[in-house]
Image (spheres, helix red, strand yellow):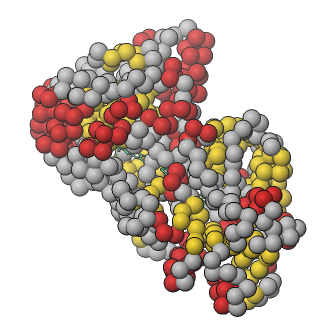
Amino acid sequence: MLSTKIASLDFATPLMTGSGTFGHDPAALRFLNPADLGALVLKTVTPEPRHGNPVPRMAEFEGGIVNAIGLENKGLAYWQDTVAPTLEGLPVPVVANAGGHCADDFVEVVKAFQDMNGVAAIELNLSCPNVQGGILYSTDSIGLAKVVTACREVSDKPMFVKLSPNVTDIRPLAKAAADSGADALTVCNTLIGMLVDWRLRQPVLANGIGGMSGPAVKPVAMHMVSQCAAAVDIPIIASGGAACADDVLEFVVAGATAVQIGTAAFLNPAVISQIASDLRSILAQENLTLADLRGSLKL
Amino acid sequence: MSLSLDSTQAVLAPIVATREVGEQTWVIDVEIEDITSDFGPGQFAMLSLAENSPTVIARPFSLYERPAPNRFTFLIQKMGKGTAALVDAPIGTMLRCLLPLGNGFDVAAVEQDVVMVAGGVGSAPFLIYAQQRIALGARENTHMFFGGRTQRHLFDHQSFDALGINMHYSTDDGSHGFKGNVIACLATELDKKRISKKSVIVACGPAGLLHAFADFARLRNLNAYLSLETYMGCGFGVCNACPVPTSVDGKFTDWPYAKTCTEGPVFSLADISI
Ligand SMILES: Cc1cc2nc3c(=O)[nH]c(=O)nc-3n(C[C@H](O)[C@H](O)[C@H](O)COP(=O)(O)OP(=O)(O)OC[C@H]3O[C@@H](n4cnc5c(N)ncnc54)[C@H](O)[C@@H]3O)c2cc1C
Ligand SMILES: Cc1cc2nc3c(=O)[nH]c(=O)nc-3n(C[C@H](O)[C@H](O)[C@H](O)COP(=O)(O)O)c2cc1C
Ligand code: FES
């Protein structure tokens, strides 16, 4: 009832984890029934190890959190040796997420993902606000097109391009990604924000700024999903603030084919199973399918 | 004790009792069925209200006591809205609990002297720790240094008194026990050789206290363990919000950080750099 297709891949449900919110490896899968999860999206991998930002790296505000993890990860070689072997034979498809400073970085990681049997699809993180250079590709459609084209040349696996909301108009970037061979767009990464401790006259996060996620960003993501769905013909994977079945259905109506659940998993690592079960009952009750609802937004 | 995520469960469970135990601090009892895994001293749970949580992420709390197989208690100091929601919730309120999490304290061998050092709600992991020492038959050589700002900050000290272990209290204002901080109190007893410097010394408390304790323990070459209260986003190893710097010659040689939630919160002082 919830099965969903993107490019050549069949997913059990339209629900995915959000990169960086469900780990670097499949350990946390144990909280979920595999029949409820469309795909496991893992934390961004960069060619070289990255130690991440100083602490505090996360803080909460009304309705969300702001994080500046700084893409801490042990790098591609470690991932290849240690994580990739654990992905083979998992009951859910794995989406590996690539990051880097320049086009060559992305190509290096994507090439490696292409050769890993356990990786079903690739997501390009062209939108991390917390590392220098990360945002460049996400705000400039020419730069973005270069990276996507170069990655497309080295991989025929389904490729999702994750866009940044930190732009005045997301549509040129969505089009650039689609025209360069993206199979789907993930819309969107975190919104840049800052929290201030007025007593200390300092930002709360050591990095100063960070990426906002959680319920407060849902309206921004919703708007961008609807804009992207109208601008391109490839599937949209929504990301931003979804925490319950109604949120997922709202994104589907706005044009999303799948929805990633990130921050909500921190409160409840089993939330995706809960949402899947709620979706099944709502759709049965209303006698509707996901296809009936997808993109049905009346504007 | 070492546990992987394999024994961690996400459950909904009611608050069945609440009692105030000092300044802005309560013990809440939660009834949780079917937790078969060990849940030991120093391990923790992520707690939040099951419905209408005023916070977007849960909050970490050490296991305080397990008075019955299905009953788990937590010592909670009201700090901000996450802790306020938990301690103000009426009996019967359902909590979302993720537990057990993290690596706790090893209950050292019977013949090993153990010294617990707690500042304020840093006492939380030590009630069950002391109970386990007593069950081993190690009451006489188990000591606890319990410090607080005032007598009202020596939370639930009657429960510790009742154990019959060697209690050493200190308060900043001298309203109960030694006047001064808990480390000064420990220093005095070490200097007088009433505490062996070969003891295993385990500490828990606010960051300032733990930093001071780390300096003190290094200077004196003590066999020290710390339970850290690092900010946590998820508590189960997926978000990278909780790094603690590792030492170059400790057991985490492959990376400059360890995750407090899954590799701690209890660390040997030799393994971390704080
Ligand atoms: C492993 C571990 C065990 C702990 N055990 C206990 C315990 O047994 N009893 C107890 O009273 N407290 C314990 N704490 C501390 C407790 O988690 C924080 O006091 C609580 O999260 C504060 O939340 P708040 O919303 O009330 O306060 P906030 O308004 O969010 O913040 C108040 C203060 O708490 C800190 N804090 C906020 N969120 C977290 C978080 N998620 N993790 C750590 N610190 C945070 C902030 O930096 C700030 O200094 C423990 C912390 C950790 C990491
Ligand atoms: C702690 C944290 C770490 C994240 N790390 C990454 C990352 O490594 N790569 C990435 O593409 N997105 C990362 N994100 C963004 C999420 O995948 C997601 O797009 C965003 O949080 C919005 O969705 P949400 O509101 O459901 O969390 C991270 C988000 C958080 C909160
Ligand atoms: S709190 Fe999320 S990784 Fe430790």
Camera-side residue of B179 and A294: B179
**Farthest top residue?**
A287
Q: Which quadrant of the figure has residue B243?
A: bottom left
Camera-side residue of B263 and B16: B263
Q: Is residue B101 left or right of residue A96?
A: right
Q: Residue at x 64, y 59 (%)?
A: B106
Q: Which quadrant of the figure has residue A126?
A: top left
Q: Residue at x 38, y 54 (%)?
A: A69
> Residue A172: x, y in percent?
19, 34
Q: Is residue A268 left or right of residue B140?
A: left
Q: Residue at x 36, y 47 (%)?
A: A191
Q: Which quadrant of the figure has residue A80?
A: top left
User: Can residue A175 be seen at all in this image of the molecule?
Assistant: no
User: Can residue B100 be seen at all in this image of the molecule?
Assistant: yes
Count of numbered labels shown in the rendering:
0
On screen, residue B45 above or below A199: above
- Quadrant of picture, ligand 2: top left
Q: Residue at x 42, y 59 (%)?
A: B252
> Residue A279: x, y in percent?
55, 20
Q: Is residue A250 left or right of residue B266?
A: left
**Farthest right residue?**
B162
On screen, residue B172 above or below B135: below
Q: Quadrant of the C terminus of chain A?
A: top left
Camera-side residue of B232 and B130: B130
On screen, residue A144 above or below B161: above
